Amino acid sequence: MTPDQREDGARADARTMCDTARIIVARGNAEFVDDGDPRGRLAAKALVVDLASALQRAPRWRDENPALWRGLKRTRDRFAHHYLDIQLDILWEVIADDFVRLGETLGDES
């Protein structure tokens, strides 16, 4: 696999994750915070962690978006290592707002 193919694959994976975040957000915040059904929260946390892992394989994207990359890495580290301290309002903000901005930087599928 060439570096360009690896980058393209990482961006495609990241676009899919951003699309998945939009589905969670479309279901609404009330469902997201529902104590009886943690699936949206668990999926959102996994998306943050997996998105950072995918974009680790996209050096061009990282070079083009250094501030977003730093923020994503910090958020990923916090969510991955401080599981019990995750505030739902912050996780919601990440998938509802930050993922939209990040998704806009990934380019169209080719």
Image (cartoon, grey):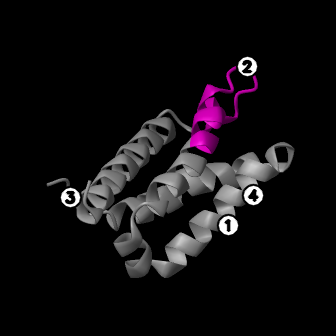
Q: Give yes or no for contact between labels 3 and 1 (Cβ–Cβ under 8 Å).
A: no
Disc 2 vs disc 1: which is toward the camera? Answer: 1
Mark sitting earlier along the chain (2/1) = 2
Q: Amino acid at mark 1?
A: Arg
Q: Amino acid at mark 4?
A: Arg
Q: Which residue is mark 2?
A: 36
Classed neighbour count for the residue bearing mark 4: other residues with Cα under 10 Å, few (<14), some (14–19), many (≥20): some
Q: In the orientation shown, which residue stands out farthest toward the top?
A: 36
Q: Position of residue 89 (x, y in %)?
A: 71, 51
Q: Which residue is mark 3?
A: 108
Q: Which residue is mark 1?
A: 74
Q: Which residue is mark 4?
A: 78
Q: In the orientation shown, which residue stands out farthest toward the front?
A: 1
Q: Give yes or no for contact between labels 4 and 1 (Cβ–Cβ under 8 Å).
A: yes
Within the image, what quadrant is residue 58 found in?
A: bottom left
Q: Position of residue 102 (x, y in %)?
A: 43, 64
The local secondary structure at tag 2 comes to: loop
Q: Position of residue 88 (x, y in %)?
A: 73, 46
Q: Amino acid at mark 2?
A: Gly
Classed neighbour count for the residue bearing mark 2: other residues with Cα under 10 Å, few (<14), some (14–19), many (≥20): few
Please say if 91 is above or below 106: above
Q: Which residues are magenta?
A: 29-46
45 drawn magenta: yes
The CA span between labels 2 and 3 is: 37 Å
Q: Give yes or no for contact between labels 4 and 3 (Cβ–Cβ under 8 Å).
A: no
Q: In the orientation shown, which residue stands out farthest toward the left?
A: 110
